Amino acid sequence: MSDTSTTTAISRRPNARDAKRAARTARGAASQPYIVRKIPRFEVLGEEGLAIIEDNADRILEEVGIEFREDPEVLEIWRKAGASVDGERVRMPRGMCRQLIREHAPREFTQVARNPARDVRIGGDATVFVPAYGSPFVRNLDEGRRYARIEDFRNFVKLAYMANSLHHSGGTICEPVDLPVNKRHLDMIYSHVKYSDKAFMGSVTAPDRAADSVEMAKIALGDRFMDPLTGRPNTALVNLINVNSPMTYDATMLGALKVYARANQACLVTPFILAGAMAPVTVAGTATQTLAEALAGMALVQLLNPGAPVIFGSFASSMSMQSGAPTFGTPEPALVLYVMGALARRLGVPFRSGGGLCASKVADAQAAYESAQTMLPTCLAGVNFVLHTAGWLEGGLTMGYEKFMMDVDQAGMFHTMLAGVDVTPNGQAMDAIAEVGPGKHFLGCAHTQANFETAFYRSPLADNNSFEQWDAEGALDMAQRANRQYKRMLEDYVPPPLDPAIDEALLDFMARRKAAAPDSNV
Amino acid sequence: MSDTSTTTAISRRPNARDAKRAARTARGAASQPYIVRKIPRFEVLGEEGLAIIEDNADRILEEVGIEFREDPEVLEIWRKAGASVDGERVRMPRGMCRQLIREHAPREFTQVARNPARDVRIGGDATVFVPAYGSPFVRNLDEGRRYARIEDFRNFVKLAYMANSLHHSGGTICEPVDLPVNKRHLDMIYSHVKYSDKAFMGSVTAPDRAADSVEMAKIALGDRFMDPLTGRPNTALVNLINVNSPMTYDATMLGALKVYARANQACLVTPFILAGAMAPVTVAGTATQTLAEALAGMALVQLLNPGAPVIFGSFASSMSMQSGAPTFGTPEPALVLYVMGALARRLGVPFRSGGGLCASKVADAQAAYESAQTMLPTCLAGVNFVLHTAGWLEGGLTMGYEKFMMDVDQAGMFHTMLAGVDVTPNGQAMDAIAEVGPGKHFLGCAHTQANFETAFYRSPLADNNSFEQWDAEGALDMAQRANRQYKRMLEDYVPPPLDPAIDEALLDFMARRKAAAPDSNV
């Protein structure tokens, strides 16, 4: 025990205290690789309304078209496939994109993780909760808001690994701005592999970074990277391809899309829409444009590599018509979400949208109202891949430590909600009612005793004590309790086992790639 | 202007500044007397599950029975109707309660307000938002938590009157504990009439207080109290009859129920259940017991006065299995809510449940998560009468000023959500998409200009500004902004017109009733 590294949280061995603490902090949700929903999905539009939107999306593709910028190869692919190409504008014959997707894109697929018990199913009745993505800033109660660093990134990977209610390690959980732009993807992927064993996302900011992501996934997965039955790579990466709405794919996104599609890695094609700026101000208009844009991207993936997995993404916020700022947790984006979920099911592809979105700068009531008003529709609409489940603040500019813990708690609750109502004899509980009878209480009856442990979702963050007890314990609000909780979790962190040969190979790959080019911040 | 009373908020005349302020604070929602929903309801259980619960509820009524305590008259009514009466235990033949309700209880009804434009429709596709009810404490950021006073009661009546998103003045918005228990109902009813023109609720704490409530409603409504067509009183009061779960009606509630039923005023029959204590720990068990208890109460109303309006109420919280404390915003009560909504529709009566419920002591993230996780299911489940829409804290022990404003804002959003998706040509916005095209923005296009004002719900409380602007403006959280907002609203309050003769008659009635008995706190 003279080696000081044994005292760090990362390398010390777990002990009984760790196990107890970990059980306590994670107890909100039972550990399961992903959720299989048992309740129906909520829909706001009937057949007629949905058919109008589909027809209009086809009209957009046929009459307005989509621009694919600075990528002659992609234009040539569209031309050969039968689309009309005018400069960078591509117009697709009615039904072409839909048909390509229906014929080739898998309805659901498995994303493999380096721990096979963590493989996630994406699509169908499965729901996968994923941390927030892309914030340059982090926030906690102690330091306020500051730029994110690789240490923050590692912290969030560790917290997501420990959170039973998150099924995925995510991607750019926050931007490690202390590392050069052209190399930070290496440290991010490495952190996902090193500090977690859950599935993760690849880099999309340049084609060579996408290629690096695939290489590192290959090293991390070892034998599991190739599917021996099909001779094709398994899908080990989900990759966020944002559309430059309205109706434009830029060269960066197309470059990453091509790398991932050809490597059989999943493209999460997401029109990123601030309604009123990048799309019409109406729900139906935003849904129509989102559908058209996503159809084009998912069809392109199928032209590049028929059968490669895609996820239909939708990110739509409303807008303050006074300031132009994006607004979240408002009713219009929730309505868009329900409509897009229905459209994705009709198309037959996995769906991504929603998450714990909010505009609030801090983890206050605004953050919570807005996040809940996005996450509940997300779960009811049947979203399969829930990016931004935990941590999101300030329209995605900031990753909040306390907010992360709150959202993890909420995600735990959705496990119970999506499991629906038990109507077995134990669920009906008629024996309990007969045993207890009028005017008595159920606390001690046999049925209550038998169901005591699992009866209700138990939040590790909510304070349900009496006012007096809460006051005596310091009158902490939820953010203050979350602050304590995330620090304790990081203290208790114990890394998952990693084959030293894989670790070495990853470090070696990173060293070579870092040496191959000077640092750059573009 | 020498009369100092003209400087009080209550009696001064409105001016242009008032109008502007009032428009600003209330702009979150358009003023409408109630919501008519245009989106479907969400259900979690199919026919089979619901039929099991209905059958089990009938078994409870038939085999276990319900106790009606210290009320021989009620027992005699049940006996004459064909029920089996054993001591205070009443067992109803299978289907008897359901049949009485189906035959006689109105599927929906109108509650008249003293301003006819504020009449509310209760049942069917209508949703009515009502303030929280029953807290002995109030809380604001300045004073913390303290006992409520009649001044607080008046404040909340004024705030509810000014809030476009609330359709109702509520009942015991908070307990004015500075007034004697046996007389405070008079001041509460008077405040509802004097400071608002929205519909309100009667007292249920003793039969004579219920009778006083009816008398005061009669004075307030004048000609509108009687329906000239039927010769029966209009329904001017909704009255909260809580069941003493499990399976017990006490003498106080029965006394109030009888007064209101006979006066054709609405009985909101609500089993009040902390699952695990007053009902089984399971969702289906809680739903079954709630249905059985409510069926008995609503059937009793029909035996007393066939056709008298009832509302099927359900209040079910989960419980901390560690402390026994009620917990809110958890998934199990939401599942109960969806099930009860479906059961109420099958029965064919208006439904009450949910609201902005939470266990949090303060208006923090916990309060918001929990409230949103109750209110959204409330709206999706099709609740008609949403008691506790605004203000609720600490399991109902505290009425929060800031929380009230936050919930009013949320209620505004639900107006938009329940209006659903516009798929008219303007909603489809195809002209906008054709006009703008790839890579441009929609801010200046004709469609955006035409829809600018009403495009998105505009929250008067959310801060969507940049971090820098928010920081420069004091870095306030939502509770701090709500604190400013409620004070400004109270400053801007202008009372609705009230016929001086009615005012005088009410004051006279109160004076006589107060003189008739000594003050008492029981």
Image: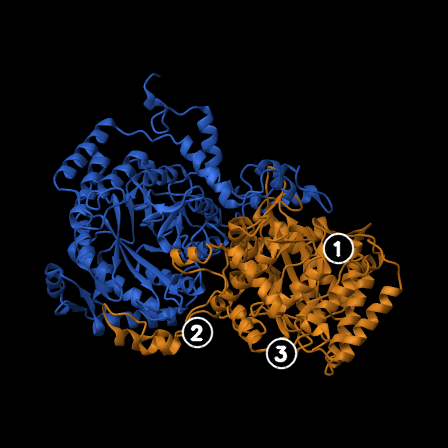
Chain colours: A blue, B orange
Q: Which mark is residue A497?
A: none
From the image, tell me which residue sits under label 1.
B177
Q: Chain of mark 2?
A: B
Quarter in which the N terminus of chain A is drawn:
top left
From the image, tell me which residue sits under label 2.
B454
Q: Secondary structure at mark 2?
A: loop
Left or right of B515, for residue B306: left
Front-lying residue, B242 or A369: A369
In percent of width and height, residue A300 lies at: 19, 59
- Is residue A16 shown above or below B43? above
Q: Secondary structure at mark 3?
A: helix
Q: Which mark is residue B117?
A: 3
Considering only order in the chain, which callout, 1 or 3, is on the residue closer to the N terminus?
3
Answer yes or no: are tags 2 and 1 on the same subunit: yes
Outermost top residue: A2
Visible residue check, residue B400: yes
Q: Quadrant of residue B204?
A: bottom right
Q: Amino acid at mark 2?
A: Thr
Q: Quadrant of residue B498?
A: bottom right
Q: Amino acid at mark 3?
A: Ala
Front-lying residue, B138 or B473: B473
How crowded pointer 2 is (Cα within 10 Å; few <14, some 14-19, many 20+) is rated as: few
Q: Chain of mark 3?
A: B
Left or right of A86, for residue A270: right
Left or right of A355, for residue B509: right
Q: CA distance from mark 2 to mark 1?
A: 43 Å
